[in-house]
Image (tube, rainbow, N blue to C red):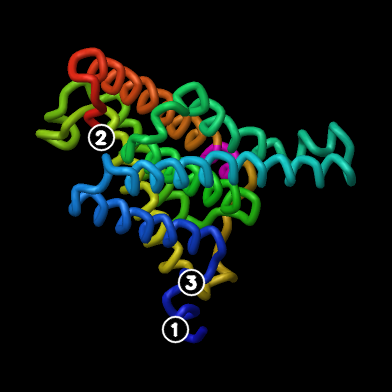
């Protein structure tokens, strides 16, 4: 337990981002072994997508129901509006649920969930300067990945748009892990106002929702086009 405590970031949602990095390692291992398109890989991707999307939606619904029982509708919307926001990127991904066999899309949705949960918690507890900078940097990387029209602007030689977005979100989560370690054991530092936290949360929500939507559309187009031409998925 002492080893686990030392390896942890000191916060639950920071540890959740750390768990995502472990998931990324497993994904890389499956890719390296050529197992992503096998039954094992497809089962892994399906489980990852299902846990990420269903788990986050269920958690946010629980938050809303708890708030509704104690505060009513107006209090729920005033205090826990972020719970509704966190579900948006997951909901956007539901129309493309058929792409869960894609390792890129499943990893993208898992990263999206980790980012939204971390930023939601940071907004509620008050953001430090380091957190604002890390989240802002992650948003910038993700926005460039989504909007860059040329591969030369982000990840030259990458396979496609969905892969760039996935890497952008992985970088985002990595930044959150780094700032979590930097904040470990420092609970008395300066915190920004709730207004700043809300603005950062909304910016993150917009960036992650855009990433989820664009990645889903790209994976769907690549998969459908490949199926029509070769009868097999390329992801």
Which marked residue is nearer to the observer: mark 1 or mark 3? 1
> Which residue appears at 43% of the width and 30% of the height?
212
Q: State the mark number for residue 184.
A: 3
Where, quadrant-wise, is the C terminus in this rendering? top left
Identify the residue position indicated by label 2 in the image: 164
Q: Is residue 82 above or below residue 178?
A: above
Q: Nearer the viewer, residue 22 or 30?
A: 30
Q: Secondary structure at mark 2?
A: helix
* Residue 109 figure quarter: top left
Is residue 133 found inside the magenta-colored segment of the image? no
Sequence order check: which comes first, mark 1 or mark 3? Answer: 1
From the image, tell me which residue sits under label 1.
3
Mark pair 2, 1: CA separation? 35 Å
Q: Which residue corresponds to the image point at 44% horizontal and 41% vertical from the top-left?
A: 46
Q: Residues within 10 Å of mark 1 (few under 14, many from 20)?
A: few
The image shows residue 225, relative to residue 192, as above or below, that is: above
Can residue 199 be found in the magenta stretch? yes
- Report the side of 102 relative to 127 (left or right): left
Which portion, as a residue range, is magenta? 196-201
The reply to whether discs 2 and 1 touch (Cβ–Cβ < 8 Å) is no
- CA distance separating discs 3 and 2: 30 Å
């Amino acid at each position: 337990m002492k080893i686990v405590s030392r390896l942890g970031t000191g916060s639950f949602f920071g540890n959740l981002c750390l768990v995502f990095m472990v998931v990324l390692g497993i994904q890389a291992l499956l890719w390296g072994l050529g197992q992503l398109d096998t039954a094992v890989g497809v089962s892994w991707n399906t489980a990852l997508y299902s846990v990420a999307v269903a788990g986050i939606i269920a958690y946010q619904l629980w938050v809303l129901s708890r708030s509704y029982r104690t505060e009513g509708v107006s209090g729920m919307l005033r205090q826990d509006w972020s719970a509704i926001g966190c579900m948006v990127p997951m909901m956007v991904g539901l129309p493309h649920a058929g792409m869960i066999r894609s390792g890129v899309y499943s990893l993208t949705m898992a990263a999206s969930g980790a980012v939204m949960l971390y930023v939601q918690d940071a907004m509620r507890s008050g953001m430090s300067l380091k957190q604002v900078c890390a989240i802002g940097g992650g948003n910038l990387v993700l926005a460039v990945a989504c909007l860059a029209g040329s591969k030369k602007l982000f990840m030259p030689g990458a396979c496609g748009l969905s892969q760039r977005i996935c890497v952008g979100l992985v970088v985002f989560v990595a930044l959150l892990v780094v700032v979590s370690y930097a904040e470990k054991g420092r609970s008395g530092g300066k915190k920004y106002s709730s207004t700043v936290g809300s603005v950062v949360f909304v910016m993150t929500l917009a960036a992650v929702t855009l990433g989820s939507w664009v990645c889903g559309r790209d994976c769907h187009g690549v998969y459908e086009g490949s199926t029509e031409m070769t009868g097999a998925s390329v992801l």
